[in-house]
Image (cartoon, helix red, strand yellow):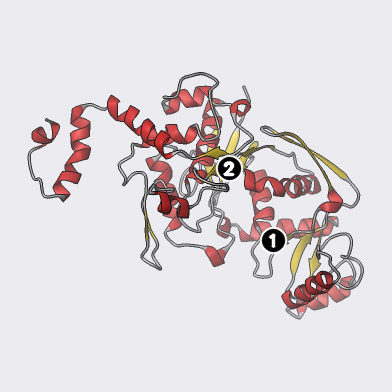
Amino acid sequence: MESNVRVRFAPSPTGPLHIGGVRTALYNYLFAKKHNGTFILRIEDTDQTRYVANAEQYIIDALKWCNIPFDEGPNTNEKFGPYKQSERKEIYKKYAAILVEKGAAYYAFDTPEELTAQRDFNASKGKIFTYNWQNREEGKLINSLVLSEEEVQQKINAGDKYVIRFKNPQGEILYMQDEIRGRITIKTNTLDDKVLFKSDGMPTYHLANIVDDHLMEITHVIRGEEWLPSMPLHVLLYQAFDWEVPKFAHLPLILKPVGKGKLSKRDGDKLGFPVFPLEYTNEETGDISRGYKEDGYFADAFINMLAFLGWNPGTEQEIFSIEELTQKFNFERVNKAGAKFNLDKTKWFQQQYMQTKDDAELAELFKPILEKKEFKKQIKKFKK
């Protein structure tokens, strides 16, 4: 058994929580509870341009309905609070400055127009422009690696916009370990110098996520496969700070039932099923997206179905309570390949759970449906 396990689910409040996100939360929760650890909710709202006002409450409500309670989070046991990144801006500024001081990051003053010109110039030569070791000190790019300290200070004092970029080590081989995918090796020369801190005073996901994970003492980073390309940068950032690297586990994608690619809202709309746990109303457009709860699914059936999208117990058993899932869950049984969503299987799980409910419980659930259709009878009649 792992000791002092601390994991986090860190969604961005840019819209409703997709079932892929719910599954990430579920796997984090199961792993934490199996090892008597702590499950944390952190709101990653650094991208203010895409922030949606009612999305944060939706995330909290969805986890509550799914019976995936968090031990620490916004307004809950804020041991390492605040748990919203927008309220931690000063922390990131400090750590970005530490990286610059260490020589692991640098100020870059290139304007978007100048970078576009560089891209276009490279494209005309049949090359792809990458901001990295190949060109960062050639003098064509405007950064603190080519400017003197005085020039950098003058630019900052004059209010010139800048970003802070990570300075990837040159000519190294990075060896990493993923709990699901095994050993991963990458050459640092293939990486670009990602922006860590933006001109608007906000960090990018990369810096904020590393700093928060370290300060919140996260031991295992369990997240979706789409973050796998970011793993080298994140490991290098830990090393640059001289911090202990947590264990990483990248979960397989949830795939559309027909064709190739990741399951999206469009697939649900086209084939007639929800891809969100709860109904969601877009406050700007008024569009309503269906939810499993409002479509009549039981939370425990929904969670049971989700657990099997990417994991299996290695036995014939398919019906599991959340307590049983907690006991059985491990990374060894998580698949590397994506898991196809299956609507018929989802309905099958619902049917299995419906058969275990007694008539009184089903009558209570049936009552509002019938009343909507103006059947106003006593609950005894509904039960019958």
Return the residue found at the far front: 259
Quarter of the N terminus within the rendering: top right
The answer to which quarter of the image holds residue 36 is: top right
Q: Are marks 2 and 1 in contact (CB under 8 Å)?
A: no
Q: Give coordinates of residue 186: x percent, y percent.
A: 81, 44
At x 67% / y 57%, what residue is drawn?
Answer: 92
Q: Viewed as shown, does residue 301 lie left or right of 80?
A: left
| SS for callout 2 | loop
Q: Quadrant of residue 277?
A: top left
Residue with the mark numbered 2: 253
Q: Which mark is residue 134?
A: none
Task: Tell me if mark 2 has few (under 14), some (14-19) or many (20+) residues whose alpha carbon lies within 10 angstroms of its own.
Answer: many
- Which of the two labelled residues, at mark 2 and mark 1, occupies the earlier sequence position? 1
Residue 258: x and y in percent read 50, 45
Residue 303, by quadrant, is: top left
In the rendered structure, which amino acid carries the disc numbered 2?
Answer: Leu
The secondary structure type at the circle numbered 1 is: helix
Residue found 56% across the figure and 54% down from its top:
44
Label 1 sits on residue: 93
Q: Nearer the viewer, residue 54 or 363?
A: 363
- Give the side of residue 55 with respect to residue 161, left or right: left
What is the x, y in percent for residue 79? 55, 43
Q: Amino acid at mark 1?
A: Lys
Q: Is residue 262 above or below residue 177?
A: below
Residue 242 or 30: which is nearer the viewer? 30
For the C terminus, the quadrant is: top left
Give percent across and percent down for residue 101. Answer: 83, 58
In the displayed structure, 62 sits above or below 179; it is below
The vertical placement of 169 against 364, above or below, is: below
| Crowdedness near tag 1: few (<14), some (14–19) or many (≥20) residues, C-alpha within 10 Å | some
Compared to 123, does 67 lie above or below? Answer: above
Numbered label tally: 2
